[in-house]
Each structure stands twice: as C-alpha cells, then as structure tokens.
Image (cartoon, helix red, strand yellow):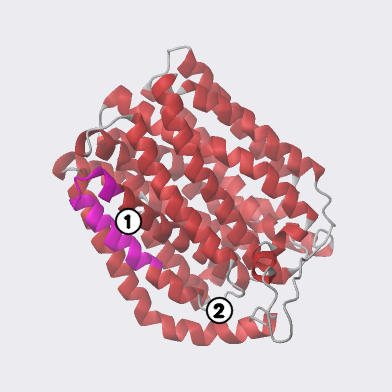
C-alpha cells in the first residue's frame, strides 16, 4: 500500500519519493529475489576478499593476484556469447543449477582451506570453475530480471535496487570478512558463502512466473542454429550505436577501473602497512560509494539523463584512482575508495540500465551476454595487465595510469553523447520510459 500524507493544497506527499524509490518491490517475484540475493551476495563479497587475501598470504605476489583474477573471469568472457544463446533456449531452471554449482564450488574451497591443504593450483582451478558458472549465471540473471518485474516501467528501478542490494552486501561483506579472516582464517568465509546460496535457490523455487514468451517465441529462437543466433546478436550490438557506445565505455572502465580491486591487498600491506582488517576497511569504503550509487539510481524517475551520469562516473573514477595511487594516508585512501566505488558502480549499473531499457525482448539474453563479456572480458585482461605492470613499476603507479585512461574514456564518451541522446530519446518516449 502506498503511504500518502496529506499536507494541504499544493503540497506534495512527503513519502511519495520513498515509495517511488522502492516501487519495483511491489512485484512478488522481485521481492523473493531481493530477499534471497541479499543473503547470497553477502557471502559472495566475503569470499572475494578472503580469496584475494589467501592468494596474497600464500604468494606475496601482485602478479599472482592478477593471474587468479584473470583465470576466474576469462572463461566467462570466452563462453558468454554461447551462454547468451543457451540462456534464451533454456528455462528458469538453469539459474537454479548455477546457484547449486556455485554453492558446491564455495564449499569445496572451504573444505580445502579449513583442512590446510589449499594451494595456488586449487585456487586457480576453482576460480576457473566459478568463471564457467558465471558465464551462464550473469546473462541469465540479467535477462530474467525483466520477467520478475510486472511493470516494464519499473525495470530501471529494479536494476537500481539490485545494484543497491549488491553494494549493501559489498559494504558489509568485506568488513565482516576482514574480521573473520583476521580471527579465524579464510576458510570460514568460504563456508558461509557456500551456505548462503541456499537462500537464493529457495527464492527461485518459490517464484511464480507466467509462461510469457516461452511458446511460439521460444520455438522461433530455437529454430536457427547456435552460430546463426550468435551472429544475429553480434550484428544487433554492432549496428545499434547507443548500445555499442555504452558497452564500449563500460568495457574500458572494466579494463582500466576494476583492476585496482585486485591490487588492494598490496596497498593494504605495503603502502598503508596494515593487514586483512585494513583490506576490509578499504573494500568496505568502496562499498559505501557503490551503495550510494545504487541508492541514487533508485531515486531516479527515468532512464533519461543516464548517459550524462555515465560520463561523470568514468571521470570521477579516473580522478579517484589517480589520487589513490598518490596517497600514503589511510584516511585519505579510505575517502578516495568511496569516490572510486561510486564511479565504478554508477558506470556498471548505469550501463546495465541503459542497455536493458533499449534492447528488444527477443535479443535480451544475447545482448546481456555481451555486457557480461564487457565485464568478464575486459576486467580479467585488466587484472592480469595490472598484476604484470605492478610487479615492475609498483601498485601505486599502476593505479595512477589506470585512472588517467579512465579519464580519457570519459572524454571520448563526451564526444559521442549528444548524438547518442538524439537516438535514444525517441525510443524512450515510444516505450513510455520518460518521467511523468
């Protein structure tokens, strides 16, 4: 029920903005997803921090931090186009199986770590397995999101809430993980993560999804060959300028912006002279900025104007990374991580929202597979490159270079934004996505 407080003639209800910010939660299926994912993502972010600290504790190598990240994500990049087609052909059950597989992967990582027999080889092997799972899970979740929301006009809000949820977990997860790792070791984080997947499995099983688009449309999608459908998806992305431009900027941000996360154990230990708790604080600060980004997106009434936010976000990220590379102060670095987290997540969630709003329904999973490629392709290459460069010139200078290139990307996008807006605004009007 929407809460309205009458204040007299000419006054706007005080609670309207609040109800508007969470309007996608009126869909029962999305509420289930929100509840399950909130628990699961907390475990996911705990595992990310614990994995990076485990690798650094075992190897003390910036290069191997990049190698592990590369191994986990390059598989998703290579399989994403195939996965996009298969996701369109297969039912919702696929998402349940990806969650089951992720739980098994985390529990295996926990068992090996708690037993004290984990080595770099096992970490890489399990990272590759998770990359294989993510190749199907990420485009599946992104394309399935629209089916969980009853009103298409609420899709942008659902993506923003999803971003806020992920970044709330990103804020709490690393902070909790830092304490657990320092007190008990990395294995307990992996164990909690493995158990947390059962929450999202339960939410998927409880959903009631209408079989829309699963009849004639599904048979039509399955009529062509796998490679023909992949080519159709690629031609659509390549020819549609707005989606192509947004994905190119997101790929650049992923290539140059995300790798600083891989190097944070080096900053925590060598630059700021701390430990796993310090790493938890830095990751948590990134989460504060990312959460602020997600909340700001929930308050938006329309996708109109998001292309400007993409430009600003890339520039903010670039400036924050340059200053972070120069900082030797813990508190200054913490503040810069807030700004970097905001820019990073505003780029990812903003690109996701624009692409999801523009893509036609019959190509949604395939197009979102290229969004997956932009992240899981560029990010691992950037992580590997950052690890190699940092091993030669140091982590601070590597992050400074990354920031400069993010700024260059923002300037490039600025030169294309006016033409892009002229193309997307009529589409938004036709789809009824303009603000009231």
What's the magenta bit mostly, secondary-structure-wise?
A: helix
Which residue is labeled 1 in the image? 256
Query: Is 197 situated above or below 338?
Result: above
Secondary element at tag 2: loop
In magenta, the rendered stretch is 313-333
Residue at image point 30% right, 62% down: 318
Q: How far apart are marks 1 and 2 (CA)?
A: 27 Å
Q: In the image, is 112 to the left or to the right of 16? A: left
Which disc is residue 304 wearing? 2
Q: Which of 322 and 330 is in front in this view?
A: 330
Residue situated in front as seen by the camera: 369 or 21: 21
Was residue 100 drawn as part of the magenta stretch in this picture? no
Q: Is residue 298 above or below residue 70?
A: below
Q: Residues within 10 Å of mark 2 (few under 14, many from 20)?
A: some
Mark 1 vs mark 2, foreground winner is: 2
Which residue corresponds to the image point at 42% horizontal and 18% vertical from the top-left? Answer: 118
Residue 253 left/right relative to 157? left
* Residue 122 position by quadrant: top left
Q: Quadrant of the N terminus?
A: bottom right
Q: Which residue is drawn at 53% across and 37% down?
A: 44
Q: Position of residue 137 (x, y in %)?
A: 61, 46
Can you give x and y, in whole percent of width and height, for residue 350 in the image? 51, 66
Residue furthest toward the front?
A: 8
The answer to whether residue 399 is seen in the rendering is yes
Residue 24 image-quadrant placement: bottom right
**Residue sitting at 53 percent across and 76 percent down?**
240
Tell me, yes or no, whether the highlighted magenta stretch contains residue 323.
Answer: yes
Helix, strand or loop for disc 1: helix
Tell me residue 420's x, y (percent).
47, 82
- Taking the image as shown, residue 218 lies to the left or right of residue 224, namely right
């Amino acid at each position: 029920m929407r809460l309205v407080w009458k204040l007299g003639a000419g006054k706007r209800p005080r609670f309207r903005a609040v109800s508007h910010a969470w309007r996608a939660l009126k869909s029962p299926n999305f509420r289930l997803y929100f509840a399950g994912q909130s628990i699961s993502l907390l475990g996911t972010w705990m595992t990310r921090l614990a994995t990076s600290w485990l690798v650094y504790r075992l190897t003390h190598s910036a290069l191997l931090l990049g190698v592990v990240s590369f191994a986990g994500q390059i598989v998703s990049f290579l399989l994403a186009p195939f996965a996009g087609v298969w996701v369109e052909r297969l039912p919702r059950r696929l998402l349940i199986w990806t969650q089951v597989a992720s739980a098994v992967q985390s529990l295996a990582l926990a068992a090996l770590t708690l037993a004290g027999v984990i080595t770099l080889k096992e970490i890489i092997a399990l990272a590759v397995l998770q990359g294989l799972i993510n190749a199907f899970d990420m485009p599946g979740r992104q394309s399935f999101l629209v089916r969980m929301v009853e009103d298409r006009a609420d899709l942008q809000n659902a993506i923003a809430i999803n971003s806020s949820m992920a970044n709330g977990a990103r804020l709490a997860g690393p902070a909790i993980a830092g304490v657990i790792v320092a007190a008990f070791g990395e294995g307990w984080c992996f164990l909690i993560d493995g158990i947390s997947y059962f929450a999202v499995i339960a939410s998927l099983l409880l959903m009631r999804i209408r079989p829309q688009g699963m009849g004639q449309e599904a048979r039509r999608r399955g009529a062509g060959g796998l490679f023909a459908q992949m080519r159709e998806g690629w031609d659509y992305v390549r020819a549609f300028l707005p989606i192509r431009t947004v994905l190119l900027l997101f790929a650049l941000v992923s290539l140059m912006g995300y790798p600083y996360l891989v190097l944070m154990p080096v900053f925590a230990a060598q630059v700021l002279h701390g430990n796993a708790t310090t790493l938890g604080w830095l990751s948590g600060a990134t989460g504060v900025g990312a959460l602020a980004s997600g909340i700001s997106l929930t308050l938006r009434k329309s996708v109109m104007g998001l292309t400007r936010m993409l430009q600003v976000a890339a520039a903010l990220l670039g400036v924050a990374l340059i200053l972070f590379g120069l900082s030797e102060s813990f508190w200054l670095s913490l503040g810069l991580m807030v700004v970097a987290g905001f820019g990073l997540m505003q780029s990812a969630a903003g690109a996701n929202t624009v692409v999801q709003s523009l893509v036609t329904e019959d190509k949604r999973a395939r197009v979102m597979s290229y969004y997956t490629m932009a992240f899981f392709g560029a990010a691992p290459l950037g992580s590997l490159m950052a690890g190699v460069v940092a091993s030669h010139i140091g982590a601070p200078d590597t992050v400074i270079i990354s920031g400069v290139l993010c700024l260059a990307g923002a300037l490039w996008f600025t030169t294309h934004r006016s033409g892009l807006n002229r193309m997307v605004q009529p589409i938004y009007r036709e789809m009824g996505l303009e603000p009231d």
